[in-house]
């Protein structure tokens, strides 16, 4: 990687400000439902502790829009981190100001301190120079390990690098290397499996990998738009009207590049989305006028499985159906299971796909599960990530 990492600097006895992405999903009772992002930050944090740094952790959680919202406090992530890393983690319910400065002054080498949600201050998201200067005041070195937030031009990601020597953490490095593998030299055949609703996010990525990809499989909400663009009647399924043209464009490009682009051959449809709703499996030619597509069908599961099984690199982003409703989660679960058993490099996009893989306890069976949803899509689309660019400027 052509940027400095935490291994390239001497951190012993130094106050090291580490930006992580502890924006973890929470249960309604406030407990953490997926601690993957906390686990992913541990190699950097452990390394810093072992090296005798004073480790000061900052992050955001949720979108509090500049207000202090108790349900978005990072305290719960500190408790979880402490259990996972088997080391005390002191929490201060501020991220700037005299309390933080005195807390930092009392740290011994190897101590860990977690500060409160940066987004309780609106200046974080506006990349306010005074705010980043205040954050920088109590540190000697900045380590960016927040890959999940690298697509945001925020004070603790970009502004801060103007005030402190700044290097990448081990997670950021690993993310860029693992995702970079897809962009540079994927072992072929290379398959992209897409689900979820929005097409626009995925089009740029597909365009960026067109000359490397062999198979594109489309499921989930976006399948309705692709099917409609192919003149199928999709009943009451939600169609991304703006995406129709994009879908047609992608299909034309795939044909030009000799890429196999497969849409579902059968789908599960339902008339209502109440918790008791039941679905029926129909061929895509026979979607009833009042039916909504809620999952891929069995023929499609089998066909996608055969395609995946002959590939050596797989990138997956987006559920195949309405995963939150157990009766419509079968397609997604089957794809997760198939991908976890492939003899291939398997890379899972972040966000909801990462949460699903974690919930199914399959994360360890994938080559790499990204901690970034928006960030991984933006990176794979060939766009710059402000967080990464800011570190490059430091060289
Ligand atoms: C994420 O989960 O997408 C990152 O933590 C960034 O959060 P944001 O989408 O609220 O900016
Ligand atoms: Mg996001």
Image (spheres, helix red, strand yellow):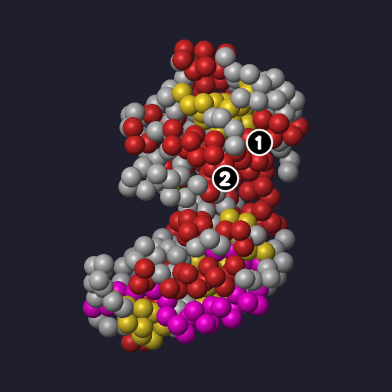
Q: Does mark 1's beta carbon lie closer than 8 Å to ligand 1?
A: no
Q: How crowded is mark 1: few (under 14 residues within 10 Å), some or many (20 or more)?
A: some
Q: Can residue 84 be seen in this view?
A: yes
Rounded to the nearest angstrom, the CA distance separating label 1 from label 2 is 11 Å
| Residue at figure coordinates x 25%, y 81% from the top left | 289
| Residue at figure coordinates x 45%, y 79% from the top left | 264
| Residue at figure coordinates x 59%, y 67% from the top left | 340
Q: Residue 39 carries which label?
A: 2
Q: Where is residue 173 in the image (x, y as percent from the top left)?
A: 67, 43
Report the front residue among 380 and 358: 358
Report the front residue among 314 and 380: 314
Q: What element carries label 1?
A: helix
| Residue at figure coordinates x 63%, y 35% from the top left | 45
Q: Does mark 2's beta carbon lie closer than 8 Å to ligand 1?
A: no
Q: Position of residue 1 (x, y in %)?
A: 73, 43
Residue under label 1, please give it.
Answer: 46
> As drawn, is 279 to the left or to the right of 130?
left
Q: Can residue 215 be seen in this view?
A: no
> As drawn, is 96 to the left or to the right of 167?
left
* For marks 1 and 2 on the same chain, the one whose residue lies earlier in the sequence: 2
Above or below, 35 against 53 in this view is: below
Range shown magenta: 290-316
- Count of residue discs: 2
> As drawn, is 261 to the left or to the right of 222?
right
Above or below, 237 against 109 in this view is: below
Above or below, 326 against 154 in this view is: below
Q: In which quarter of the image is the C terminus?
A: top right
């Amino acid at each position: 990687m052509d940027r400095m990492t935490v291994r390239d600097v001497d951190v012993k006895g130094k106050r090291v400000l580490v930006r992580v992405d502890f924006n973890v999903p929470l249960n309604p009772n406030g407990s953490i439902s997926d601690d993957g992002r906390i686990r992913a930050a541990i190699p950097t944090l452990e390394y810093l502790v072992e090296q005798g740094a004073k480790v000061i952790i900052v992050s955001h959680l949720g979108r509090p829009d500049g207000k202090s919202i108790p349900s978005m406090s990072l305290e719960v992530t500190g408790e979880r981190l402490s259990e996972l890393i088997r080391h005390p983690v002191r929490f201060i319910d501020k991220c700037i100001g005299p309390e933080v400065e005195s807390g930092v002054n009392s740290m011994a080498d190897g101590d860990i301190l977690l500060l409160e949600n940066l987004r309780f201050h609106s200046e974080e998201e506006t990349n306010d120079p005074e705010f980043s200067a205040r954050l920088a005041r109590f540190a000697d070195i900045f380590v960016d390990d927040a890959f999940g937030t690298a697509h945001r031009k925020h004070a603790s990601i970009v502004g801060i690098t103007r005030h402190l020597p700044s290097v990448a953490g081990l997670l950021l490095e690993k993310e860029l290397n693992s995702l970079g593998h897809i962009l540079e030299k994927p072992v072929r055949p290379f398959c992209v499996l897409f689900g979820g609703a929005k097409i626009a996010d995925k089009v740029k990525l597909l365009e960026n990998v067109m000359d490397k990809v062999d198979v594109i499989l489309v499921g989930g909400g976006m399948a309705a738009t692709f099917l409609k663009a192919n003149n199928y009647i999709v009943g009451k399924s939600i169609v991304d009207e703006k995406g129709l043209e994009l879908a047609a464009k992608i299909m034309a490009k795939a044909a030009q590049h000799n890429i196999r682009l497969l849409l579902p051959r059968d789908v599960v449809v339902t008339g209502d989305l109440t918790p008791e709703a039941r679905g029926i499996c129909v061929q895509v030619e026979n979607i009833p006028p009042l039916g909504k597509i809620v999952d891929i069908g069995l023929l499609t599961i089998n066909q996608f499985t055969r395609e995946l099984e002959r590939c050596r690199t797989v990138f997956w982003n987006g559920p195949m159906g309405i995963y939150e409703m157990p009766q419509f989660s079968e397609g997604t679960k089957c794809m997760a299971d198939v991908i976890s058993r492939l003899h291939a490099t398997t890379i899972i996009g972040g966000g909801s796909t990462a949460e699903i893989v974690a919930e199914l306890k399959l994360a360890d069976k994938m080559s790499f599960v990204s901690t970034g949803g928006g960030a991984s899509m933006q990176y794979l689309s060939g766009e710059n990530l402000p967080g990464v660019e800011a570190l490059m400027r430091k060289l």
